Image (spheres, rainbow, N blue to C red):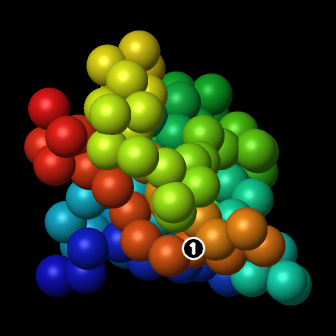
Amino acid sequence: MNLYSVLEHEITLDQAISLLLDSKLRILFFQNEGSRIIASFTEGDALRAIMRGMDLQSPAIESVRMSPTVASSDIGAADLRKMFLSSRHFAIPLVSPNGTLDRVATYDEFI
């Protein structure tokens, strides 16, 4: 089981759901060509897409909210804890100054 996955833009909704179910954190990420995180895909995104009647063969990226919540990889623990407490996020990607994924912080780590 993977902790999380980074997806190709062409992946379909049904493929993303399968990967999501095999992801320990139940979160997947989309990157652009420069490896910057541009979107996340969660169980909520999958459920909303299904409820809207989105075809399972549609590109999964059409079901996500672009510009996900991220934090700098050098954020302090206290500030990251505040982010978790003020949001409903269970995982926050920590990114380098150029926007590439360093690691994923989880709610359980800081609360």
Furthest-right residue in view? 33
Query: At x 32% / y 44%, what residue is drawn?
Result: 77
Q: Is residue 3 above or below residue 109?
A: below
Question: In the rendered image, which residue does mark 1 sit on?
Answer: 101
Q: Does residue 26 appear left or right of residue 6 in this picture?
A: left
**Quick one: label 1, few (<14), some, or many (20+) residues within 10 Å?**
many
Counting from the top left corner in percent of width and height, residue 64 is at 66, 45
Query: At x 13% / y 43%, what residue is drawn?
Result: 108
Q: Is residue 80 above or below residue 17?
A: above
Q: Is residue 41 visible?
A: no
Q: Is residue 82 above or below residue 43?
A: above
Viewer-closest of 90 and 43: 90
In the rendered image, the quadrant that contains the C terminus is: top left
In the rendered image, the quadrant that contains the N terminus is: bottom left
Counting from the top left corner in percent of width and height, residue 28 is at 47, 64
Q: Is residue 39 visible?
A: yes
Viewer-closest of 99 and 52: 99
Viewer-closest of 24 and 35: 35
Query: At x 76% / y 45%, what residue is drawn?
Result: 66
Q: Does residue 98 appear left or right of residue 1 in this picture?
A: right
Query: At x 56% / y 48%, what residue is drawn?
Result: 71
Dot 1 lies on which element?
strand
Where, by quadrant of the figure, is residue 63 drawn? top right
Furthest-top residue in view? 86
Q: Does residue 111 appear left or right of residue 103 in this picture?
A: left
Viewer-closest of 4 and 46: 4
Kind of residue at disc 1: Leu
Counting from the top left corner in percent of width and height, residue 57 is at 64, 66
